Amino acid sequence: MLLLLTAGVALPWAAHAHAPLTTTVQFDREIVRILDNHCVMCHVEKGPAFPLVTYEQTYAARWKIRQDALDRHMAPWAAVSGYGDFINSNALTQREIDFLVSWSESFGPRNNGEVYTGIAAAAAAPKVIQAHTDFDQWALGNPDAKLAVPESNQHATIDPKLTTDRWLRGLEYKPGDRRVVHAVSFSIQETGQWLGTWTPWYGFVSLPQGLAYKVPARSHIVADIQSSGGPSQGTLGLYFADQPSQRVVTSVTLAATTRLDADTNILALEPQIRPGLQSIEVAARAQDGTTRVLLFARDIPTAWPTPYVFRQPVALRKGTELTVIEHGSSAADGSMPVTFSTYQGAALASEAPPPTKPTVAAPTQHFKLTGTVKSVDAVDGRLVVQHGTIPGFMGAMTMSYAVGKNEDLSRVKAGDTIQSDVVVSGSDNQLENIKVTGKSAD
């Protein structure tokens, strides 16, 4: 039997117009904050990666950003969430990933829902918001000593010219050419003591209060540089403690399984990455059999070696077994060295938490709202408002808003018309200065 399909034959399914994707995520608000906190340390002019500073640059790369965020390839951070709490984490949160995906798939709203067209802006263009970071700022304050790091793309030796033993509580590094430097590991040449590793997103080392590295007189600091190009000079800032360290801070390199011969506190660890590595696990097994995973990292980018600095020192009892398990390395013996920064004895109670990487506060913005109250929740301090277009913020819609703590909702009822300020900070917004301009018919 021959079946002929003609233009007059009805198809067994209905055709539907493609529904437009919409989002309230905006470059000038949520996206620029993500760029400030995770991206522009590398994605800048004269940086190691393509710039993501302006709206236009970010809009053009939005599909790559989306895919890298979903694949968790960027920002570079290999530690799996839930195994260890690291202060230098550069991982995107799930909320940040959702923001990036929603923004990319909704054609990249800039501020009030308009998309980039490549056409010259009108005379009354809104204020231009860009991502930014301050490479000249010292996160730990002005250093006690600033030392020039000789030009090199592999190893450099720095002489701090110490005539007496000193105690080092922190250090900070600023590369001369950010385009080629991916990581720099610092150690004391004469003792082998690992001091810490610089990465673009966490450019300093700061020990908890009461702890410091001993730097012997006439010793030298070695910088091992991970570079993707030519040599680069740099500046190393040193921060000295006024008092000797309350515990001896040492570094030790372990592989496979090692039993601790004393109570030990781990400040940081750094695997020595080798080609082919798929994942690595560092675990601590107590004498009662309980096991704690200190680090589980996978898909580790070899171009971005990084330390894992614990937010608070990890205290382990004498007799605990430290085990390093790796998968996929090309090492013949199947073991990967991991360097630990530790001190022995009872854990010190720190009076203040260690510093975190500087973040850029989102600018607070004010917009004008006019609308009709649909419902009032005085207990939780919220209003559902049907409003028209809020210039520079969003289009007309019905939306639930939190209200400022000084607002009196007892004088607002459903059906009232109001005018208010919408105060936006980061991803949060609330209504302030609420004025009832018309009472409900009830």
Image (cartoon, grey):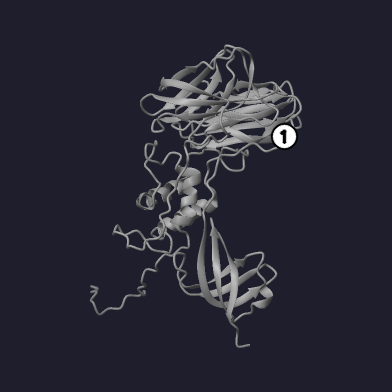
**Left or right, residue 15 beside residue 275:** left
In the image shown, does 220 or 292 lie closer to the viewer?
220
Q: Quadrant of residue 380?
A: bottom right
Determine crowd level at label 1: few under 14, some 14-19, many 20+ residues with C-alpha closer than 10 A: few
**Left or right, residue 18 beside residue 386:** left
Residue shown at the point (39%, 37%) measured from the top left: 47
Residue under label 1, please give it.
350
Quarter of the figure with the N terminus: bottom left
Kindly tell me whether residue 149 is visible in this rendering. Answer: yes
The secondary structure type at the circle numbered 1 is: loop
Quarter of the figure with the C terminus: bottom right
Q: Quadrant of residue 7?
A: bottom left
Residue 85 drawn above or below residue 96: above
Residue 248, position as x, y percentages in the image: 69, 21
In the image shown, does 123 or 225 lie closer to the viewer?
123
Residue 427 drawn above or below residue 174: below
Q: Amino acid at mark 1?
A: Ser
**Left or right, residue 86 beside residue 92:** right
Residue 119, position as x, y percentages in the image: 28, 59
In the image shown, does 137 or 76 lie closer to the viewer?
137
Residue shown at the point (56%, 39%) measured from the top left: 357
Residue 262, position as x, y percentages in the image: 74, 22
- What is the tally of numbered marks visible in this picture? 1
